[in-house]
Structures are given as structure tokens and as C-alpha cells.
């Protein structure tokens, strides 16, 4: 049964497209009931409207908190047209049926995204009547059409003008979208309150860095930001979604200033580039290839850091993605624009006008390079991160908090000199961003060799040394996990490695330390592992 649409109830926060939609409904003979700002908006456009308060006999009160929560409203939405008892009940109470409900919700997400919004302001943007109307109409979609997004207006109007009714298929589709709409809205509110609690209990962490408790359940709600050309490979469909509470400086909030459409792999690499850059001293630069850092550096100037990061592995850097923890300036842009260099994408807090001009006019790849301004780079916050597995999700706190150096121990006879301490801190910061088993070599606070994602730690050491070449002599080595044997130490000593930093904890730590002492290598044990699977 598809009842003719004779009455529409309108109560919207987002009024885009509403006047044109209402004009089309009136032209089709539909009577419109509206409340508050929606009524005033339509009346100012000369559209005849019946006031909800006049119909219910109850005025709006409590600064608009109570408007549409009334039996004469919900009875008209929930009544089943094929049930004589339902129709007799509403007739006895002077209730008219509504065949169309046009409702979208208070701008809660937009409100909490503003700087300095108080809890009281956020609470007043929690919609009560709106979700109730949407859910009621969606539940009774056998007879009622629910529109909760302006993008739905055109399809509804086409069917109303064609036949005076909407099809059951459209009503069912809109009902599903409506329940997603209210679910996402409630999730955004739940996340907001969860984050309030997290801020209030910011110090309530165990020594392992985990919250003292984990929720029994939680809901994930994401908003579609953009469909992508394809996924990791051309035969895979892909899209990017944004979390309601996406933090400042995150990739999904970035402004794309220039370049062709970003790919699925671009987003993965850019996220890694930002993560590495975030952990580096300023000015810091990270060069990412296939989701691993092939270069990273800090220096007195950004151009110097860019040069040293690129030359960590210039062959791999060709066609890479870069992350900066400070605005890109003209000198850094000039370095990247040299003819023998090619960059896919760059993420940075911002780009100076001179840097933007250079990167979009000078290099041969100028038309396609993607430039993303992410705003101020925030430090890591140890927030919950999710990874999908078959049938569910894994949840953990992000490994983006700095280690407590008071827990570090020099366990060898040789002690690191000051310059080595700076390199050890740098290499340790980068190592956690390399796929395990991970070995990195650093020298003068620049990455000179990486062994990533190997099944054997000694193979990872071998690859890192090969990448570094002569630069391995005098470099420091960082390992994301302990050395199970002393063979890696002997190989590092042969290459000229001067100092090592690693978590420790192996049953053969004594043998590993003895090997370092044999070669005069200093070693720091941090007590904390940084696997990245």
C-alpha cells in the first residue's frame, strides 16, 4: 500500500534545498506542517505552512527543547493505514496522518569541531525530537517516506509529481539510510562523552600505556569523505571515511591544495609519513616508500633536513611520499624540484606561497604532485586504533607516545658519547615506524639504512647495512625488538656500527652484551618493544 502524500512534516537544521523542495510539494498539493526555524524559513519564502504548535495545541517551550514530542505528531507518523483500529484511534483524537517526514538533526558534529566549545554548548546540540521523528517514520516506512538528507529531495519529488506516491522500494531504501543517520549521530555523541572521560582521566594509565579499563562494546561510525579510483590494486573498490572526532593535524582533515586525485596507497603512505614526521625533532622530514620510511632526518634548516632525508636512500626516494612537521619553505621546495627528483605527494602543516609556487610550476611533475596542508601537527595521544580481521576488529592504544628515558639503561662497558645519544634517540624514534622485524641505521640524525619486514632479524641487519654502505661506519643501530642471538652484533661491528639501542629481554641478553663489549660498542636497553606488524 502506497498512500498518496497529502501531508508533510518538516523540521530541519540543514535548510539547503528546502525551499525548492517545499515549493515542489505544494505544487503537488501537499500540505506542509513545520516547527520553529523551519516554519519561519518557509514562510519568509512565501510558502504556506501550518504551525506544529497550533496543530498540537502545545507551544514550543524550554528554548525549543520541546517542539514535536506530542501524540498528535507521532500518532500521525506511526499509524498503520491498513489497520482500521489504528485509523479509528487517530480519528477519535483529531490526529491527521503524515505521509512524508522531512527531518535532519542539530549540527552536533559541527558544534564540537569548533575551537573552545563548552560542554554546555555541545549538550544543547544533542537533538531529541529529531531522531525520534526520523526513527518513527523509518519504522513505519510501509506507509511513510522519510527524508533526512537534502540529497534525497529530488528523487522523492520526482515520484510525487509522477504519481502522487513514493514506491515501497524507495521508502525502504530511505528508511535504511535514516537508521544509519541516527546511528551515526548517536555514535558521535557517545564518542564525545567517551573523549570527555578520557581527558578527565588522562593520567589513569598502566605502565604498559593501556587504559585501566576497556569498554565492553563500542560502535564505529564513519562518514564517507570520498570514493577512490580503486584500492591497493585496480580490481579493488575503495573509499575513505572520516571519524566524527578526527583530531587536528590528521590526514582526513587535510586540505588538498594541488594535484590529481589521491589513491588508496597514497593515503596509507601519507599517513605513515605524518606519523614519522610527528615523532621527529623540528624541523623534521620523512620519506616514505611502500609504507616504510626510506629516509628521515632533522637538521638546523628544513632544506638541510630535506636533503639528508632524501639521500638516506635516493633510489627508493624516487616516486615517494613526504611528510614534514613544519611548513614547507622555498628552500626545501627548490631541493625537491630538481630535475632528478620525483615526488608523488607531500603532507605538511602548510606551504609558504613561495614553496607552493615552486612545487606547482617548476618540476616536470608539477601538474600531478599532491600537496596536502594538514594544519598544526599534534603530538601523539595514545588513542585507540582499530585493525580489521576476519569477523571482527583488533583494538589497541596507538604506539605514538614517547618512551620514558629514565627507564633506559646503558648495559655495556662503553658509554655513548653526546653525538651518539642524539643519533640513538633519532633512530629509536624512527624504528617504531618500520615494519617488523625492523632495523634502522642512523648517523648525524639522518636515516642511512633500513631493513624492514624481514622474517629474520639478522637479515634485517644485513639489508640495513647494505643500504647504508660506507655510511654504516660510525652509525648507530636501532632494533624494534630484542636480539635473540649475538650474530647481528658481530655483523654490525664488522660494518663499523658504533652504538646500539634495543629493548632487551632476550634469554641471551648476556651473550649479546658480551658481544658488544668484545667490539667496544655501546648499547642502550630501553625495556620497551616497538613491533609494527
Image (cartoon, rainbow, N blue to C red):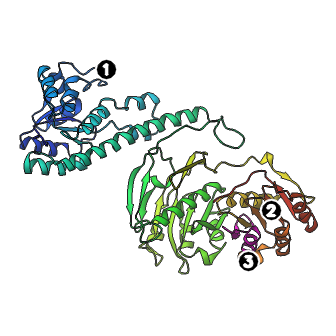
The magenta-colored residue range is 443-465
Neighbor class of circle 3 (other Cα within 10 Å; few <14, some 14-19, many 20+) is: some
Residue 142 image-quadrant placement: top left
Q: Which residue is mark 1?
A: 62
Label 2 vs 3, first from the N-terminus? 3
At which x and y percent is residue 530? 70, 55
Residue 354 shows in this picture? no
Residue 472 image-quadrant placement: bottom right
- Asked whether 406 falls inside the magenta stretch, the response is no
Kindly identify which numbered label has been placed on residue 466.
Answer: 3
**In this rendering, position of residue 412 left or right of residue 31:** right
Instruction: State the separation of the CA atoms marked 2 and 1.
Output: 66 Å
Label 1 vs 3, first from the N-terminus? 1
- Total numbered labels placed on residues in the image: 3
**In this rendering, position of residue 175 left or right of residue 234:** left
Kindly identify which numbered label has been placed on residue 483.
Answer: 2
Name the image quarter holding the N terminus: top left
At which x and y percent is residue 303? 61, 67
Q: Nearer the viewer, residue 13 or 368?
A: 13
Q: In front: mark 2 or mark 3?
A: 2
**In this rendering, position of residue 199 left or right of residue 26:** right
Amino acid at each position: 500500500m502506497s498512500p498518496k502524500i497529502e501531508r508533510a512534516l518538516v523540521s530541519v537544521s540543514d535548510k539547503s534545498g528546502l525551499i525548492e523542495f517545499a515549493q515542489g510539494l505544494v505544487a503537488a498539493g501537499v500540505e506542509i506542517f513545520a516547527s520553529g526555524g523551519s516554519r519561519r524559513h518557509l514562510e519568509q519564502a512565501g510558502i504556506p505552512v501550518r504551525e506544529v504548535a497550533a496543530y498540537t495545541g502545545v507551544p514550543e517551550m524550554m528554548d525549543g527543547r520541546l517542539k514535536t514530542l506530542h501524540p498528535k505528531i507521532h500518532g500521525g507518523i506511526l499509524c498503520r493505514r491498513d489497520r482500521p483500529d489504528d485509523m479509528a484511534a487517530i480519528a477519535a483524537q483529531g490526529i491527521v496522518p503524515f505521509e512524508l517526514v522531512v527531518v535532519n538533526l542539530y549540527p552536533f558534529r559541527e558544534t564540537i569541531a569548533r575551537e573552545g566549545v563548552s560542554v554546555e554548548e555541545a549538550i544543547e546540540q544533542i537533538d531529541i525530537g529529531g531522531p525520534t521523528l526520523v526513527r518513527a517514520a523509518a519504522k513505519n516506512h510501509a506507509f511513510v517516506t522519510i527524508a533526512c538528507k537534502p540529497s534525497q529531495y529530488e528523487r522523492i519529488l520526482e515520484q510525487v509529481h509522477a504519481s502522487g506516491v513514493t514506491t515501497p522500494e524507495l521508502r525502504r531504501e530511505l528508511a535504511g539510510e535514516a537508521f544509519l543517520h541516527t546511528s551515526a549521530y548517536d555514535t558521535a555523541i557517545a564518542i564525545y562523552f567517551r573523549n570527555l572521560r578520557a581527558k578527565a582521566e588522562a593520567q589513569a594509565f598502566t605502565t604498559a600505556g593501556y587504559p585501566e579499563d576497556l569498554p565492553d562494546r563500542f560502535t564505529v561510525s564513519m562518514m564517507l569523505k570520498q570514493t577512490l579510483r580503486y584500492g591497493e590494486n585496480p580490481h579493488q573498490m575503495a573509499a575513505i571515511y572520516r571519524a566524527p572526532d578526527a583530531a587536528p593535524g590528521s590526514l582526513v582533515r587535510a586540505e588538498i591544495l594541488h594535484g590529481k586525485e589521491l589513491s588508496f596507497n597514497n593515503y596509507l603512505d601519507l599517513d605513515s609519513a605524518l606519523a614519522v614526521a610527528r615523532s621527529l625533532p623540528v624541523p623534521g622530514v620523512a620519506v616514505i616508500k611502500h609504507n616504510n620510511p626510506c629516509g628521515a632526518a632533522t637538521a638546523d634548516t628544513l632544506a638541510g633536513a630535506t636533503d639528508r632525508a632524501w639521500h638516506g636512500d635516493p633510489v627508493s626516494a624516487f616516486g615517494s611520499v613526504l611528510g614534514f612537521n613544519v611548513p614547507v619553505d622555498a628552500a626545501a621546495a627548490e631541493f625537491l624540484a630538481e630535475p632528478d627528483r620525483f615526488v608523488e605527494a607531500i603532507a605538511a602543516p602548510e606551504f609558504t606561497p613561495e614553496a607552493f609556487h615552486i612545487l606547482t610550476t617548476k618540476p616536470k611533475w608539477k601538474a600531478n604532485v599532491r600537496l596536502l596542508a594538514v594544519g598544526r601537527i599534534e603530538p601523539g595521544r595514545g588513542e585507540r586504533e582499530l585493525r580489521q580481521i576476519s569477523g571482527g576488529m583488533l583494538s589497541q592504544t596507538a604506539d605514538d607516545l614517547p618512551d620514558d628515558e629514565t627507564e633506559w639503561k646503558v648495559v655495556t662497558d662503553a658509554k655513548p658519547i653526546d653525538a651518539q645519544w642524539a643519533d640513538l634517540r633519532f633512530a629509536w624514534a624512527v624504528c617504531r615506524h618500520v615494519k617488523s622485524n625492523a632495523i634502522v641505521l642512523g648517523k648525524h640524525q639522518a636515516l642511512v639504512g633500513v631493513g624492514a619486514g624481514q622474517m629474520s632479524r639478522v637479515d634485517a641487519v644485513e639489508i640495513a647495512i647494505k643500504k647504508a654502505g660506507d655510511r654504516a661506519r660510525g652509525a648507530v643501530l636501532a632494533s624494534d625488538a630484542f636480539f635473540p642471538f649475538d650474530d647481528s652484533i658481530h655483523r654490525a661491528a664488522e660494518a663499523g656500527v658504533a652504538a646500539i639501542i634495543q629493548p632487551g629481554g632476550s634469554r641471551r641478553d648476556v651473550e649479546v652484551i658480551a658481544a658488544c663489549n668484545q667490539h667496544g660498542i655501546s648499547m642502550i636497553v630501553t625495556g620497551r618493544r616497538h613491533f609494527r606488524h
